[in-house]
Image: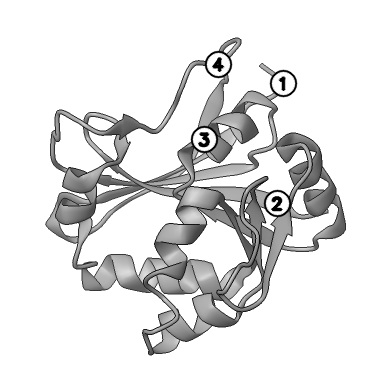
């Protein structure tokens, strides 16, 4: 069975989407770039929502380098009821119920399936206890606006801290796993 890994950039005030976060997190610092490369090389596939897919698909196919080559060549699964003709190579559209489609994908997979961005999808995965690991790159900035990483849930979602790593420029990599037995 595969493992769903949510990997997100987040500001200190919890923002995970918006122009200020994108502006602040780019260019990708060297140490962060190495972490993302290692993560992509270890992953079996990418999992994205439609908006996340469109964001990545508009940027990565024209890029080159080890990281770009990995993202461009790896299998990508997009949860969408509206995406008709995915242009980014090795893309499969999951059209049915998002939770059931991801649950089936997870059962068929053998390795990590990494979800980048795609906050609506991440919210649904968290709500239905499908996330096996949460990797947060926390940037030392308060942005004051954007979309928060977590939406409302039907109940508490306890997590346990698996690891921490302080990176250059005060960025912290936090890794959490579900504490389902709590």
Q: Does 76 sit left or right of 20 as displayed?
A: right
Q: Are marks 4 and 2 in contact (CB under 8 Å)?
A: no
Query: On residue 181, which mark appears?
Result: 1
| Vertical comparison of 158 with 163: above or below | above
Q: Does 114 sit left or right of 109 as displayed?
A: left
Q: Residue at x 32, y 32 (%)?
A: 147
Q: Which residue is drawn at 26% across and 42% down?
A: 18
Q: Does 110 sit left or right of 164 as displayed?
A: right
Crowding at dot 1, Cα within 10 Å, few <14 / some 14-19 / many 20+, comes out as: few
Q: Earlier in the sequence, mark 2 or mark 3?
A: 2
Mark 2–mark 1 Cα distance, whole angstroms, equals 18 Å
Mark 4–mark 1 Cα distance, whole angstroms, equals 18 Å
Residue that label 2 marks: 3
Q: Which of marks 3 and 4 is in front?
A: 3
Query: On residue 120, which mark appears?
Result: 3
Q: Residue placed farthest to the bottom in the image?
A: 65
Q: Is mark 4 on a helix, strand or loop?
A: loop
Crowding at dot 4, Cα within 10 Å, few <14 / some 14-19 / many 20+, comes out as: few
Q: What element carries label 3?
A: helix
Q: Are marks 4 and 1 in contact (CB under 8 Å)?
A: no
Mark 4–mark 2 Cα distance, whole angstroms, equals 21 Å
């Amino acid at each position: 069975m595969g493992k769903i890994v949510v990997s997100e950039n987040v500001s200190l005030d919890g923002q995970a989407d918006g122009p200020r976060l994108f502006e602040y997190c780019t260019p990708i610092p060297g140490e962060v770039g190495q972490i993302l490369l290692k993560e992509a090389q270890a992953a079996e596939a990418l999992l994205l929502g439609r908006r996340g897919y469109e964001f990545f698909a508009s940027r990565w196919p024209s890029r080159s380098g080890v990281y770009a080559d990995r993202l461009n060549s790896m299998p990508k699964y997009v949860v969408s009821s509206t995406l008709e003709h995915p242009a980014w190579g090795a893309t499969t559209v999951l059209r049915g119920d998002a939770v059931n489609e991801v649950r089936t994908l997870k059962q068929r997979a053998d390795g990590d399936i990494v979800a980048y961005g795609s906050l609506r999808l991440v919210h649904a995965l968290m709500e239905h206890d499908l996330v096996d690991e949460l990797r947060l790159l926390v940037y030392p900035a308060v942005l004051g606006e954007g979309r928060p990483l977590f939406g409302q849930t039907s109940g508490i979602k306890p997590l346990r801290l698996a690891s921490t790593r302080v990176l250059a420029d005060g960025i912290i990599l936090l890794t959490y796993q579900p504490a389902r037995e709590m």
